[in-house]
Amino acid sequence: MHAFRLTVLAGAIAAGAGMAAQAQPATPAQLAPIVVRDAPHPLDASRGDAYVATRASAALKSQADLLETAQTVNVVTRAEMERQGSTSVAQALRYTPGVIAQYGDTDVRHDWLTIRGFTPARYLDGLVLPFGARGYAQPRIETYGLERIDVLKGPASGLYGQSAPGGLIDMTSKRANGERVREIELQLGSHARRQLGFDLGGQANEAGTVSYRVTGVGRRSDTPYDHVDDDKAFLQAALAFQLSPRTRLEGTAQYQRIVSDGGGGAPALPVLGTLQPTSAGTIARSRYVGDPDYDRFTNTQTFVGYTLEHRFSEHTGFRQTARISDVDTDSRRVQIGLMASPTQAVRYAWAFPESARAFQIDNQFHTALTTGPLRHRVLAGVDYLRETAHFTESQLNILTNASGGYALFDPYAPQYGDFDIATPPDGLNIDQRRSQLGAYVQDQIEWDRLHVVLSARHDRVRLDTHSRQAAGTTTDANGDINRTTFRTGASYVFDSGVAPYVNYATSFQPVPGSTRTGAALRPTTGKQVEAGIKVQPEGSRALLTLAAFQITQDNVSAPDPQNTRFSVQTGQVRARGLELEGKASVNDSLDVSFSYALTDSEITRTNAADTVGQVGNRMAFVPRHQASVWADYTVRSGPLAGLGLGAGVRYRGSFFGDLNNTHALRPVTLVDAGIRYDLGQASARLRGMQLALNVSNLFDKTYVANCLGATGCYWGTERTAVASLRYRW
């Protein structure tokens, strides 16, 4: 194992929370009875301490009641992540309907996710994260530094700009709100996992005008796969100043470095030996098929930003958020290229480093006003994004023996020879620049119990892609894109806490690359119709959402049959389905959640020369059925006071890993469990200490998480246990 030091520096830097929702003053007297709904849970508005969220900012770029929001928004709070022992974003979303981790939770490099069948844009604190030219320069977000995760379903271009029609993920960092935070957590677990984390925050001066928060993680760990490590150093910090009663400024910074000998990802294995046993049986789940001396993955990411907020009056204000992002990844791997026989593989070495730099700024003006019987909350803004990316893909170096023939590799009885592999020469270089300037306006209209949202946005996008082949061939694809997108929705909140709603929204997303003639590819466009009902019984801490939707995406690209290095765009895909999610804090002891998703996806049109016959096939990574349930119980009194128990069951139906629908992934049911104990209940001297154990895949179910092709199958993660000792004071 490659060794490196994880040095975590503590400093008095902190972040401020977003603007708190403003409560309207009560009217002293009314001519007719009114129904006053419960105020949001005091731990909910912008933090994740409550198990059930009732407010979110992702859908409307401002704190809004989820019951009144005419769109599906799934929220995973900090409390839920801790109860379930989530160690990655993919794990945190495993109980969220319609969200699929494409490789399960097997990749320490990235969180590859789809929402309703589409790859979502990922946001951190309201600003989009870099993606790169090929997606390898995506940052990996550390869950210990998060307060909550919001999953916004459906097109969001009417407010956010370019994005896929399935939705987006907005993650909220732990922020400073002036409250004292003191936490240290030690983790030990399967695969020699050793992790130390800390979370410190509070007021930095007596007047309370300066607040801070600093969060850090140091980790050394192996993985379920031989020769693959998962080592990390993470530091997140911010400092907030209350410059005046109406003005607040916060600066934020984050640094993370991941080093993984072994390449960082789960080994890609052949169909024979995973989905289909051979005469030798199945390949061991821990089997490594790379080269220990060559394979390596590193990721260094840095974010620096600020948020400035100013209130001109009680109902009018301005908010500006900006961030500079830098992500640099380097990947080298030896992989199986083909199977010469059921037990003999031909391998190749390759490298694919990518870097991305981004600057973005979002300026928002908001006000509240009344026109006759209508109450308006108006949001208007202008944002700008500029991202540059550089991607290099090496040529494929087939491993040979001393006589020049293939160096055959047996995945059932591996022998790792010393090939002294050098990084192969470059095969492809891509330099890509994209910029986006968008202006948007949104009006939230209230009339009695009717809530209507209207939003529109116009974007001007410039995408320049310069590609260089090893043979010296260069291709330039440049294009300007002007698009107007919108969203409209309405919900009606009855006194009983039942709120039916409907919405319609559109999206667009630029597509890198060019046609065979050199023309830039057109952006894909999407539209969704959604109708549903939300239920939040008065006086409860519960929220139930039932939604039916249909999404259509046009201008989907496919390989050009005359030259597969280029693309043609005549495709269309459709996803429609039904989603159900319920979360409830039944009482102070019992928290429950359940979900179900039925998704019918189909390729409805492709290019005229499609010889494979994809029309009618299902989209990749979209199971028809998906379901889960989780229950958590805490003993509050008696001799077992302080004991907490949690357990969950999740089901993922069959799906395909490619558009040709070549290999069907079998359905799988997995069980997770957790137990914790408040040591302060046993002794006053141990007050603030909690011991916990979380186990994923409790019964060690063997299953294939995905299969992209004949040599692209991935085992799902085996049973994994993590024990933690946390001290808060």
Image (cartoon, rainbow, N blue to C red):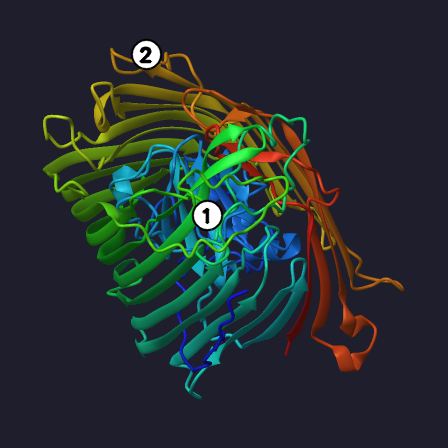
How many callouts does the rendering have?
2
Residue 90, visible in the rendered structure: yes
The quadrant of the picture occupied by the C terminus is bottom right
209 left or right of 184?
left
- Identity of the residue drawn at 65% across and 27% down: 277
As drawn, which residue projects farthest toward the bottom? 206
- Indicate which disc residue 147 carries: none
Question: Callout 2: few (<14), some (14-19), or many (20+) C-alpha neighbours within 10 Å?
Answer: few
Mark 2–mark 1 distance (CA, rounded to whole Å): 33 Å
* 213 sits left or right of 723 in the view: left
Above or below, 88 against 701 in this view is below
Location of residue 520 by image quarter: top left
Q: Quadrant of residue 373?
A: top left
**Residue 68: horizontal and vertical position, in percent?**
44, 40
Please tell me how crowded label 1 is: few (under 14), some (14-19), or many (20+) other residues with Cα within 10 Å. Answer: many
Instruction: Give the secondary structure at mark 2.
Output: loop
- Residue 344 at what x, y percent from top left? 54, 34
Mark sitting earlier along the chain (2/1): 1
Q: Which residue is mark 2?
A: 611
- In the rendered image, the quadrant that contains the N terminus is bottom right
> On the rendered structure, is 250 left or right of 681?
left
Residue designated by label 1:
111
Q: Position of residue 446 (x, y in %)?
A: 36, 40
Q: Residue 448 occupies which quadrant of the picture?
A: top left
The kind of residue on which mark 1 rests is Asp
Give 403 or 123, whichever is nearer the viewer: 403
Going 56% across and 67% down the picture, which residue do you hit? 220
Residue found at the far right of this picture: 639
Residue found at x 26% / y 50%: 425
